[in-house]
Image (tube, helix red, strand yellow):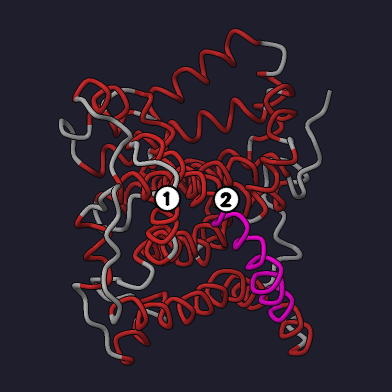
Amino acid sequence: MSAPAKTHITYLDSIRGLAAFTVINDHFVTAYDLPCVDSFCKNLLDLTPLHIWWDGSAAVSMFFVLSGLVLSLKYFRLGHQADLNNFKLLPYITGRLFRIWLPYAVILLISAAFYWHTVNSPLLNTALPPTEWIVNMWRNHALTPIAMLRESFLLSLPAMVVLLPQAWTLTIELVLSLLLPIGLLLEKQGSLWLALFSLIAVFLLGVSPFLLHFALGLLIARYYTVMANYLRPKPWLRRFILLLGLLFYTAISTTAHVFGETFMWIVTGLGAGLIIIYTLSSHRTQSFLEWPILRQLGKVSYSAYLIHMLILLCLTPFLLTQLELFSSNHLWLWLGAWLLTVISVQLLSLLSYYYIEIPSISLGRKLINGLHFK
């Protein structure tokens, strides 16, 4: 049986949605700690592979592997050689800027308005105490309008990003996606050229290690059909790849204190790649990822990534004060605040998707068509 048509693959969106969900969980845990009262519980949820549900670092690795895969997949429809006949550089760059930067700029503007309100309002006292990390996120960093404007330049963010601290990944994402043409040209000469270029750039020139993740995604795109057809009739090999992928993917939570940061990013990126390889060869997993709720997570994943810190900073404390009217139990307060935060993020992300993301993409397409790029 041949592999699915390499156009838009919704189960990859679902994986991205789950990764974004993990980042939201990570930041909620960082803001309000784990729902534990003893060290055994904390160690179990923090220092074992059970950490996967809030392993935001691993999720970032997944983002970049997926990015390399999704952006390059359509150029390998005809086989191992990238088909660049219809690739146009200026329309591509314009499309990426309107896809990534414009929604970011809109959410940044909204965050700036809430920033002024928050820093000038008293801190809400909640029975579930926030950590200093979330309390000091805005209150200990005074921003001028000029400083806010600097945070809008996604290609050159300041050292301390205050309004949307998660934006550091978006800078790397935008830069790497703009380098896609180079990656495709190198891959056209052979996978070894792409691998050598990526290794030299990271280890000799100091480029972000996420370039390796992006290159891995590009390699998976090139051999997508071959790997899917080879692994599909070999369930034992697929399961081994999944197990190995999960071990690598969760390694940063269990061994980060032993190895260097760059090494651990590489390991989690490799784990993300193996999980994706398993998924592209497993019809059962693909069917699971096609569930409507997971597809919904995927559809609004970018908006969720953009707005979740705003929700944590401004809405979650208020939700906690309302939950305290019904219970003072630590676990129930944590679970209630987490659930309401997740629901709020998803609902507001849906609005952002339809009223910010889609108009931004449409505006970019109209600009491309209006300028008649050749």
What SS does tag 1 mark? loop
Instruction: Give the residue displayed 58% in from the left and 46% down from the top.
Output: 17
Q: Is residue 358 magenta?
A: yes
Q: Which mark is in front, 2 or 1? A: 1
In the image, taking residue 133 as reference, residue 186 lies left or right, namely right
Q: Which mark is residue 325?
A: 1
Query: What is the quadrant of the N terminus in the image?
Result: top right
Q: Is residue 113 above or below residue 26?
A: below
Query: Callout 1: 10 Å neighbours few (<14), some, many (20+)?
Result: few
Count of numbered marks = 2
User: Distance between the Cα atoms at labels 2 and 1?
Assistant: 20 Å
Q: Is residue 245 above or below residue 368?
A: above
Q: Main secondary structure of the magenta part?
A: helix
Instruction: Give the residue displayed 59% in from the left and 40% down from the top.
Output: 15
In the image, taking residue 118 as reference, residue 95 lies left or right, namely right
In the image, taking residue 180 as reference, residue 353 lies left or right, namely right
Contact between labelled residues 1 and 2, with CB atoms less than 8 Å apart: no
Residue farthest along the top direction in this orientation: 236
Q: How far across and how far down the image is residue 166, in percent?
A: 38, 61
| Pick the front one: 107 or 8 | 107
Q: Which mark is residue 343?
A: 2
What amino acid type should be assigned to the residue bearing mark 1? Answer: Leu
| Pick the front one: 294 or 150 | 294
What SS does tag 2 mark? helix
Q: In the rendered structure, which segment of residues is drawn in magenta?
A: 344-364
| Pick the front one: 7 or 152 | 152
Q: Quadrant of residue 279?
A: top right
Query: Callout 2: 10 Å neighbours few (<14), some, many (20+)?
Result: few
Q: Quadrant of residue 142?
A: bottom left
Q: How far across and how far down the image is residue 340, in percent?
A: 51, 49
What amino acid type should be assigned to the residue bearing mark 2? Answer: Ile
Q: How far across and how far down the image is residue 197, in percent?
A: 40, 51
